[in-house]
Structures are given as structure tokens and as C-alpha cells.
Image: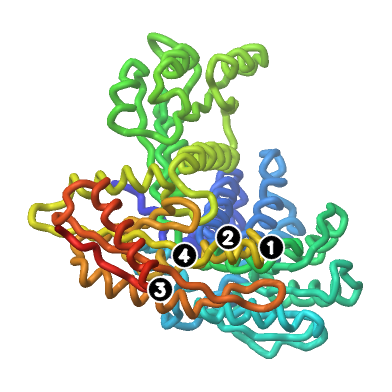
Amino acid sequence: MTKHIPNTIEERLYVLRTRWERYVAKGQFNQFIEFAVAVNSLAEYFNRLHLSGLVRLCEGLEIAVLAKLGDQASHPMAQQDILALQRQLDTLLSSVEHSRAPSMEQRTTEPRRDTTTAEADWIKPRTIWLVYAPEKREIANAISSQLRFFGFDIHELSWGAEPVSEDAVLAVLFIPASENTRPEELARIEAIRAGSPSSQLIYLGAQLAIDPIVTLMRAGVDVTIPDEGQCANVLNCILDLVKVNEQEKYRVLIVEDSRVAVALIQRTLAQHGMDTRAISDPGNLLEVLENYHPDLILMDMYMPRFNGVEATRVLRQMSAYSAVPIVYLSGESDVGMQVEALRLGGDQFIIKPFNPVLLAAIIKTKIERFRETQRSSRLDGLTGLLNHSAAKSRLNTMISQLPEQNMLTVAMIDIDHFKAVNDTYGHPVGDQVIRGLAWLLKGRLRSVDLIGRYGGEEFLIALPGISPEQATSVIDRIRGDFCTLPHSHSSGALYSSFSAGVAAFPMVETAAALTEAADGALLQAKRLGRNRVEQAAYS
């Protein structure tokens, strides 16, 4: 029978409490390991949902737990140690309950998508406190209006005012009078941190030096944003807290001939939502790789027929697998052998018996870096949308896979007078305008639609199953919304607009011809005065 893996927050908290209670009752070392894995898994869950305040509390508990994990002879723990961990656990559980939003009626900036049970289960608060000095009212108003546009509930406070809202707070933005933080401002930050342990604390206007930033972090600040381009970075930081990542499960191929080791590894990684496949014979490695496409290979050093290093050397000669992370797992304690194994293609060496929390952390970090490297070749760094080449490739694929007698409409979008924005307000504000349009497109379009940054201030979108008339209506509504979106800067807020051209398949039959026709319609929209959507004319 497949063991049920907890998905909802209630299930995860139940597992955490149950494992702690079992350890307190019996004091067995393996029970403490299970509790440590549950704490680590909960931290990963909160991190995936961008609940950074709760991540911090989980990590504090995890550090305390890991400090007690090294020496099996020290278990069961002394009563004072149990009480100390119990206090940290109670603080975490209390903060989780406090942070849960009371209703499902909250708006979201992201499109409606299918989400996992775990993601849908957590409804994040959207209240933000904006604490600012009187001298910074203009910039505070600009940031406030922009955040309100995206559905956030803003409570504006002076540095000396007491918060009046009792709702769970997503974030607190601090705008000081100057870059030199005053002692009373640090005291205020510490007080708010103590009262809102799960909220994200963001400080605007920090000095670009280590000492003052460390001082702010010690007071409880999570993120510091320097003066240069601060307005352009605030909304990006806040939206990252509420967006839901559609992340494909991490896939790990285990090459290991010990059934006991495989069972322990699979159980540990399943706790962190990772998918695994295990083989005992490395001779089947290439066949399995072709079908499974893992993000990481966990390789035993010594197996029948040939060893893990030999298998790795074979893989590193194949372009398809030359960059896949390979982590060795072995009882080999000879440092020279370990160094040689890494030199010949491995990425990490873990000694058996392994710490399950450390194993999961290493695998997760390696996979994240591997996937980030893959994404960086496909995604635009500023907006997170598909870049020029990836968007063109995706459009070709969409056309080739389009059902017969189905339509696909393509639109080219260009921000009006964008050069004037850069010349007048600077490139950071120009970047903010580009990101603002990207966020609107992601928020208003479907998950099946293609959205790409085609270059500079130009975007490419493709809407399968949508007629040119329907697409024109949808894009025109987005155009109207974009015109009312305030883009904050140091002197207030500016507003922008865009023009768009629309063309459709099968009236135009290739991806290149579609983008060319849509671009022609875009040029026509500009000739007619900009801030409008035009359809392509077909001969």
C-alpha cells in the first residue's frame, strides 16, 4: 500500500504534532529523526508558498532540532531541552494559526489555475502596513496606490503610531526619514517583529553597506531595498509573496542495490514531495534515463558489474546528461577516493549512514540550481516570461499541435512612448512599467495562453481557441486596465499605455507569418494614434 503523503496544512501540522508527542512519550532516537524530517518538510512547504515569516520560525525550530540530532546517546533528551523545544514548537503553531486568513474571498493577482491541494489550502493575508516618515508621504502615496491597484489592503501608519488592524498581515513596509536609521526606528521595527512574527518586513532606503543592513536584519527586517530603484522593486517583492508557483515535482533517480537504503531514501524524499524511481542495476541506467528524465541522480559508489564513478563517466560523455546533478551516496570514507569521484563528474558526496534532513536539503538545492540554469535559457530575467527564442519556439509548437478547424490568435503588444519613460524617469522605472504589463498579462490571461517578452518593451501573446474578435476584446480590456495602473517613482506615479496588433490562424498559416501580420497591425495602431488594438487585414 502506498503511504499517504500529507498535502494540506492541517495534515502537515498533525504529522508534526504527532511525531513530537511520540518522541516525548518514548524518547527514541528514530522518532526524533522523524520529527526533524517533519519540521524540515514544513519549512519547505512554507517556502514554496512564499510565507517567509513562517519559514523563519520553522528554520529556527529546525536549527534547534538539528543541534540535538548528532548524538544518539543523548536521547531521550533532558526535560529542560524538551521544554525548550516545546516552547519553540508552540510559538510556530500559534503563528501559523494567526497567519491563516479568515476567508476564501480574497483577490489574487495571478490567473485562475489548477493548484495542488496544498497550495489551494493556504489562503494568504493581503493586508500590508505602510510605516513612513512625514517627509516621505509622496513616495508612500505612490506605492500605496500601486499596491491597491493589485488588490492589497493598505494601512498607512506613522513611525510612532500603533497598528490598529488585528488581521493577519502579509508584509510591513518601512520608509524612514533618511538612510541613517534612528534608534527609535529600530525599536519600532523590533516591536512590530515581535507582534507579527510571520509577516515579511521590508525596509526601503537602506544604505549599501553591510553594517547597517545587518543591524536592520537583527531588528527583524527580512528584505532591504536601497534608494536606487526602490519603487520599482517594492511591488515585485510583494507579489512574490502571494503568487503560487506551478512547480513540477522534483524527480530523483536512485541507483542503489540495497533495498533498505532505497526504502529510507524514498521515504525521506517523499516527505518533501519529491518523486523517485529506483534501479539496482546500473546497466539499465540509460534506458531509465531516456524515459524518466530525472532532475538528479543519487548514485551508490559500489554496485554489481561496475561502480558509480564509471557510470558517471559514461553519462558525462553524453550531451543529454552532461549537466544532470549526480550525488554519490556511499560508505566510502577515504577522502582521496571521494575527491577522485568528484573530479570524474560527481557533484556531491554523502557518507552512509546519512542524515535524512541533510540528504533532502542537498538534493533540493542541487535540483533548484539545475532547474534555474535550465530556466535561465528560456525565461526573460526581468519579467519571468518566455524570452524571444522560447516564445517563438512555443508558438511553433502550439500551431503544430492545434486541433483541426481550431483557431489561434496572436497579438503583438508594444508600450507607447517607452523611450520617453526611460529618458525622463530612468531605466529602473522603465523596468517597472515593463513588469507591470507582464503582471497584468499573467493575471488576465489563461494558463494555456502563451505570454512572451519579444524584446525591449514588446510582448507576444497567443490565445488558442480564440477568434480575432474575442482576442481584440480581451486585449482591449487589458489595455484599459494598464492605462489606470500607477507606476510609482520617487516623485509620485506615472501612467502608461500600449498599442497592439492581432492576427489569426488559419487566415495566416505559419508562426512567422502570424507574428509578421500581427506586427503590421501593431504598426497600424501606432499610425492611428496609439493606445488602441487593431486587427490585421488579410488579402
* Percent coordinates x, y for residue 383 in the rendering: 50, 56
Q: Amino acid at mark 3?
A: Gly
Q: Mark 3 Cα within 10 Å, few/some/many (few <14, many 20+)?
A: few
Residue 236 visible in the shown view: no
Name the residue beneath numbered marker 3: 529
Tell which tag, 4 or 3, sits nearer the viewer: 3
The quadrant of the image that shows the C terminus is: bottom left
Residue 229 is tagged as 1
Give me the C-alpha separation between circle 4 and circle 3: 13 Å
Whether residues under marks 1 and 2 lie with C-beta atoms below 8 angstroms apart, the answer is yes
Residue 415 is tagged as 4
Give me the C-alpha separation between circle 1 and circle 3: 31 Å
Residue 356 placement, left or right of 535: right
Who comes first in sequence, dot 1 or dot 4?
1
Q: Residue furthest top?
A: 305
Residue 113 is tagged as none
Give me the C-alpha separation between circle 4 and circle 2: 12 Å
Q: Residue at x 69, y 59 (%)?
A: 85
Image quadrant where residue 488 sits: bottom right
Residue 102 placement, left or right of 504: right
Residue 431 is tagged as 2
